[in-house]
């Protein structure tokens, strides 16, 4: 890092890059995006023009980007299938890596990323921005303060009624590794395990469904999908038992005939109190032999000059804290070992659904 400036290379200039990472990185102090790579050169050129330095370089081969010694950090923002091998190459090239979620399409590929991180000594983090929401950070502090006690039951929820992503490769099983479970269920599961601080699964049972893929009357929020290209599940559900006996229920869908859709939220039940995100963040328990419910207020106060207007977005906060970790050499908030367990559980649910049997973790 010359003169304290962190220089970032972007690999994959599609939707998640434009919608999340690049706009937020542009706001980070003493951070520059100096290189952009995409298999479609025009996408990389557009990203460089909008978010890069005047001298930003454009590539279609990510290995050429990795060969630039001035790049400190690489963001891997490709389809899921490519997360592992690009991250491994980037770490071995001496770059810190932020990889978009999920960590990888299976645990074997995720393990390669962990091995490369340890081998290189560089930082690796996974893009679980839901952790950086105000409600999630408050709930995590409550958990760390012991408010919930021993959390022994939790629910991870990511349910959409009819909101199937019809762009990119979301419907392609080979490129993505799965559908809503690996796409949005992964956020809910990450939040839940983080709140529990429990990363030791014992076994799981899972089901996946292809019930609505072939609908011709779809009512989809993002326009009609092509049934022939819809090769992933439309919904998936899991029941996970942890080594200490705690239970996690995971529910995910892109398309489900369900009237209470909620995405990337968690519910935790402990020996002292419980918490959920069903109607804002709610903490419930017993005080003075009476039931209580507390609802923290996350809206900005009346003095805009003091509170700021709307505060910092989760994506902005994630990128800022990530770059601060890189600059200071500190462990990132989202640790790769945690993301690895999320990937293992998702893989176990898919395998249980395939075999019709419980999946036991080693």
Image: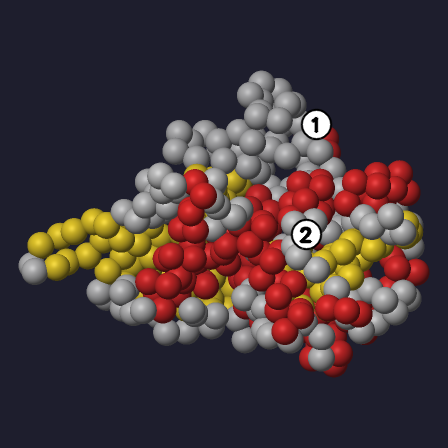
Q: Reply above or below: 38 against 269.
A: above
Q: Residue at x 78, y 54 (%)?
A: 33
- Determine the CA span between mark 2 and mark 1: 34 Å
Q: Pointer 2: residues within 10 angstroms few (<14), some, or many (20+)?
A: many
**How far across and down, in percent of the image, does residue 248 sit?**
40, 59
* Res 290 visible: yes
Q: Is residue 271 left or right of residue 126?
A: left
Q: In percent of the image, x 82 and y 64: which residue is there?
A: 71
Tell me residue 228's x, y (percent): 72, 31
Q: Is residue 249 visible?
A: no
Q: Nearer the viewer, residue 45 or 301?
A: 301
Q: 166 or 97, which is in the foreground?
A: 97
For residue 196, which quarter of the picture?
Answer: bottom left
- Residue 96 place in picture, x, y as percent: 73, 68
**Helix, strand or loop under label 2:** helix
Q: Determine the residue located farthest toward the top in the rendered image.
A: 217
Q: Quadrant of residue 114?
A: bottom right
In the current view of this chain or complex, which residue is farthest to the left?
289
Which image quadrant: the C terminus? Answer: bottom right
Tell me: 356 left or right of 249. Answer: right
Q: Label 2, on which residue?
A: 25
Foreground tag (2 vs 1): 2
Residue 13 circle label? none
- In the image, is residue 309 above or below residue 24? above
Residue tagged by mark 1? Answer: 226
Residue furthest front in the image: 305
Q: Residue at x 55, y 54 (%)?
A: 317
Which is more N-terminal, label 1 or label 2?
2
Q: How is the image coloured?
A: secondary structure
Q: Quadrant of the N terminus?
A: bottom right
Count of numbered circles in the view: 2
Tell me the element at label 1.
loop
């Amino acid at each position: 890092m010359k003169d304290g400036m962190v220089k970032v290379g972007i690999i994959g200039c599609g939707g998640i890059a434009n919608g999340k990472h690049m706009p937020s990185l542009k706001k980070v102090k003493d951070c520059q995006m100096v290189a952009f790579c995409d298999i479609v050169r025009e996408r990389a050129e557009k990203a460089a023009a909008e978010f890069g330095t005047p001298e930003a370089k454009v590539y279609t081969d990510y290995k050429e980007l990795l060969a630039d010694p001035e790049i400190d950090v690489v963001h891997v923002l490709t389809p899921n299938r490519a997360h592992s091998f690009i991250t491994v190459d980037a770490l071995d090239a001496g770059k810190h890596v932020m990889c978009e979620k999920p960590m990888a399409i299976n645990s074997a590929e995720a393990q390669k990323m962990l091995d490369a991180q340890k081998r290189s000594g560089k930082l690796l983090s996974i893009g679980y921005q839901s952790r950086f929401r105000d409600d999630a950070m408050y709930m995590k502090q409550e958990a760390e303060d012991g408010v919930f006690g021993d959390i022994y039951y939790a629910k991870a929820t990511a349910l959409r009624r009819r909101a199937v992503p019809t762009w990119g490769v979301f419907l392609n099983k080979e490129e993505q590794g799965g559908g809503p479970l690996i796409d949005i269920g992964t956020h809910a599961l990450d939040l839940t395990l983080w709140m529990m601080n429990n990363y030791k699964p014992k076994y799981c049972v899972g089901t996946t469904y292809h019930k609505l893929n072939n609908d011709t009357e779809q009512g989809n929020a993002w326009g009609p999908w092509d049934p022939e290209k819809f090769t992933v599940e439309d919904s998936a559900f899991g029941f996970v038992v942890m080594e200490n006996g705690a239970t996690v229920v995971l529910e995910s869908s892109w398309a489900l005939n369900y009237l209470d859709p909620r995405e990337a939220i968690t519910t935790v039940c402990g020996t002292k109190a419980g918490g959920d995100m069903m109607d804002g963040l709610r903490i419930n328990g017993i005080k003075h032999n009476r039931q209580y419910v507390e609802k923290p207020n996350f809206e900005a106060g009346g003095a805009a000059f003091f509170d700021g207007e709307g505060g910092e977005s989760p994506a902005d906060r994630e990128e800022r804290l990530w770059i601060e970790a890189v600059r200071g050499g500190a462990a990132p908030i989202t640790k790769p070992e945690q993301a690895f367990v999320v990937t293992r559980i998702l893989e176990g649910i898919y395998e249980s659904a395939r075999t019709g049997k419980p999946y036991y973790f080693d």
